[in-house]
Amino acid sequence: MTTTERYLTEYVAWLSIEKGRSPATIEAYRRDIGAFCAWMTQHKLTVTSVRDNKFEQYFNELRSAGQADSSIARAMSSVRGWFGFMVDEGHLANDPTARLKGGHRGRTLPKPLGEEEVIALLDSVPHSTPSDLRDRALLELLYDTGARVSEAAGIDLSDLDFDEELILVTGKGSKQRLVPMGATLRSVLRDYLGAGGRSEFPDARKVTRLFLNARGGSLTRQGIDLIIHKRALTAGIEHSRISAHVFRHSCATHMLAHGADIRVVQELLGHASIATTQVYTAVSVTSLQREYRNAHPRAHE
């Protein structure tokens, strides 16, 4: 597998697992990006050598070939999204599509679960088996810390500090940050790490990762996604509404709704820019507007 193919595979996995895109949407992204990769190969370019003027050349060629404006706009969004992802992941230092005109799509607000839904989901996980204890600890960690799915999968046992009540999380570009270990999370982690929990998984002593799969290996991002969908089904929550990213959205939105400072939320989530965190303030305002319309006697004519 070439470097370009690996980056594309990572991006497709991210779209599916962390963004929850539909198979049809992902296939459209893959087609658009694949066509651009073929064009780069034809012109002896790579993702690290392509420059901004080459993108204009490519899309001008699509126009000359008679492609519809809507198809070109979609292709621009696909290619921009992929290069933006590679920058976020630390594969590229700069985004060569930053000056590309067109192809912008409006930012969609995240759709968090309600607080009652999250509590109901967490409380629906029993305490009967090692997998139950693992799943409860995993879901609690995703909601309590707002960690990305890849960050949760990468936590080692040595990253847990029960004395200081902190967890060391390794994020994008191998940047590390400390996140608090709340009382509930601390309790369910101790249950999982105690008798009848993690130690019951095969080869548990040989693996450093916190979360293990049924075979005793490290739990993957895909494995986490399957657990979330399974537990959502049990709790009566439509699986298309929930992913690890939704837990992250819910954590940030609920904290802001309860008065947390936006810079505290930025630090918790590991956002490089405050602008990324500000989208959650818009979600809070949307929730405020909805509650106002439902509750205030003068909100309707």
Image: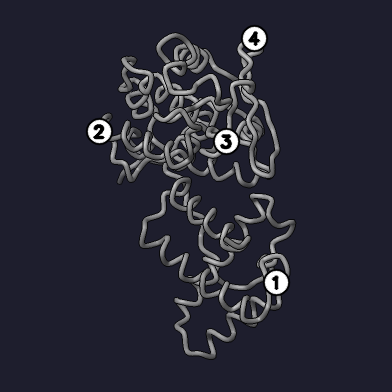
Q: Look at discs 2 and 3 and give the one toward the viewer.
A: 3
Q: Estimate the x, y position of residue 22 in percent, counting from the top left.
A: 37, 56
Label pair 1/4, CB-CB below 8 angstroms: no
Q: Decide which of tag 1 and tag 3 comes sooner along the chain.
A: 1
Q: Estimate the x, y position of residue 63 in percent, counting from the top left.
A: 53, 86
Say which of 204 and 255 sits in front.
204
Is 206 displayed left or right of 212 in the figure?
right
Colouring style = one colour
Q: Residue beneath label 3, please?
A: 151
Q: Please tell me the numbered disc located at residue 50.
A: 1
Q: Decide which of tag 4 and tag 2 comes sooner along the chain.
A: 4
The kind of residue on which mark 3 rests is: Glu
98 lies above or below 252: below
Label pair 3/4, CB-CB below 8 angstroms: no
Q: Residue beneath label 4, please?
A: 163
User: Which quarter of the rendered picture does the N terminus lie within?
Assistant: bottom right
